[in-house]
Image (cartoon, helix red, strand yellow):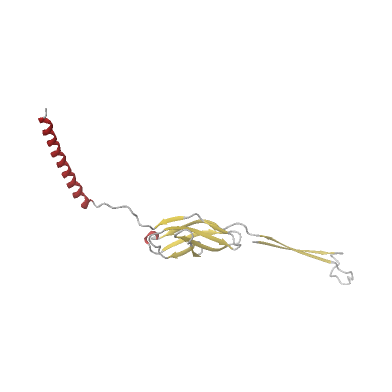
Amino acid sequence: MVLTFATLLVLSGNPAAFGSAGDTREETLLESSFISYRADTLRPEILAWGLEGPVNQGLPFVAWANVTDTESGVRNVSLIVDPTPGTETLHELLSNGTHYVGTLPGLAIGKLYSFSILAYDMANNSATSYARTIDMRPVTTTIVDPSVTAPIVVGSSLALMGLVIVVSIAYDRRSSRTV
């Protein structure tokens, strides 16, 4: 916010004579004042932000953001946590002199989280950062244990091989008699 104050003072008559002894002329005084105001229309700038610590392990972690506003100053910086669309929560980050920092509780398992930074300046302009996602849903791939499956696979393959040999020999004997 920029404020400008100016005062215009106009005196009529001989300026050297004003205030001198024996000056009986009336003074004409015209005074005018004006104020100019320029509103802050620029949003705060989110230079960088991140999450530190065991975010994907369900333990408390730290969120930080580097936010500046050269016009009116930064009023508030928050981390938006959205586990499902439409259920976002705001966690205020506090200034430590250089960054805005906050410790957040661990995330619940089984959800896909979206994170972003929301900042306001003193003129109520806002800025929102890009979003980052963290997937806390369990992995559904099946893990095969070779110590359990190898004997079954090898044994069944040997049995199938034996069956194919027996059928081949029987077929060979049967086809050789008819010739």
Q: Position of residue 112 (x, y in %)?
A: 42, 57
Residue that sits furthest to the bottom in the current view: 21
Residue closest to the eye, 16 or 87 = 87
Left/right placement of residue 4 relative to residue 55 reads right
Please give left or right for residue 170 compared with residue 119 in the image: left
Which one is in front, 38 or 83?
83
Point 14% across, 36% down: residue: 168
Q: Position of residue 108 (x, y in %)?
A: 39, 63
Lateral position of residue 121 relative to residue 150, left or right: right
**Residue at the spot 43% in from the left edge and 62% down from the top edge:** 62
Locate the N terminus by quadrant: bottom right
- Residue extending furthest toward the front: 178
Residue 136 percent across, percent down from the top left: 39, 58
Relative vertical location of residue 169 with respect to residue 146 in this rendering, above or below? above
Q: Which sits in the foreground, 123 or 80?
A: 80
Q: Report which quarter residue 26 is drawn in.
A: bottom right
Seen at 18% across and 44% down, the residue is: 157
- Please tell me in which quadrant of the rendered image residue 106 appears: bottom left
Q: How many marks?
A: 0
Front residue of 60 and 138: 138
Q: Where is residue 179 drawn, in percent x and y?
A: 11, 27
